[in-house]
Amino acid sequence: MVEIEILKKQYREKALAQRKFFKTKDNDCLIQKNLVSAVGKENNLIVSGYLPIGSEADPVSFMSKMSLNKVVAVPVIVGKDKPLKFTIWTPDSELELGAFDVLIPKSISWVVPDILLVPLIAFDSRGARLGYGGGFYDRTLSMLRLQKDIKAIGIAFSGQCVDEVPIEITDQPLDGVVTELGTLWF
């Protein structure tokens, strides 16, 4: 267990440096265009996006467009070692800093999403995802997949793809990854 955590830490350091190289306005725009076909047009779905931090791919313009005909939510960290909860977000939401200095809406309206757009540090061709190490999305996906059919779509730059992400039994796979080059389904 300790060995895999060391390996994941090494992957994170390298992948974060790589991600900064691919973070451009053009790549973000291409990802947002590709998200349209990946998410689909069914109106009664709740889509959870995220408000990006650092060099994460930015889905906010896509989320704004989606909010015209879908319920859009963002994750909220409610406690250490707990699954994420999701609150409704609109482009007009008044925001405040939540846990880990992540922006969240001031007004909370809890919902359960059907599609999760997931930030990541690295991914591989199996759908394995490397996150920041807190396990929030893994716990959340594990819980939600027991409750309903849910789709987890990673959002990343193509340069974040690695040969193989080191995984543990608790790591939840993605159903797909949207990059500036297109969508990979697993």
Image (cartoon, helix red, strand yellow):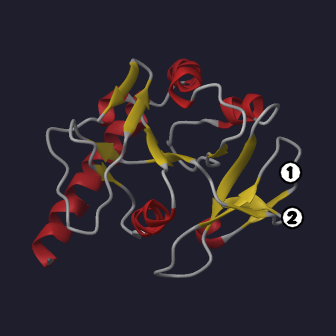
Q: Which residue type does callout 2 highlight?
A: Ser
Query: Do callouts 2 and 1 mark residues in contact (Cβ within 8 Å)?
Result: yes
Give the image location of residue 38, x and y in percent: 50, 27
Residue 58 versus residue 151 in the image, above or below: above
Which residue is the site of mark 2? 107
Measured Cα–Cα span from mark 2 to mark 1 = 8 Å
Q: Which residue type does callout 1 highlight?
A: Ser
Residue 20 versus residue 112 in the image, above or below: above
Residue at point 54%, 21% (across, down) = 37
Splitting the image into 4 quarters, where does residue 127 fall? top left
Which is nearer the eye, 11 or 17? 11
Q: Quadrant of the C terminus?
A: top left
Q: Quadrant of the N terminus?
A: bottom left
Q: Is residue 162 left or right of residue 69?
A: left
Tag of residue 93: 1
Give the image location of residue 151, x and y in percent: 47, 45
Which is nearer the eye, 18 or 78? 78
How crowded is the residue under tag 1: few (<14 C-alpha within 10 Å), some, or many (20+)? Answer: few
Splitting the image into 4 quarters, where does residue 146 fall? bottom left
Q: Is residue 67 left or right of residue 1?
A: right
User: Among all residues in the image, which is located at the extreme left?
Assistant: 3
Label 2, secondary structure: give it. loop
Tag of residue 54: none
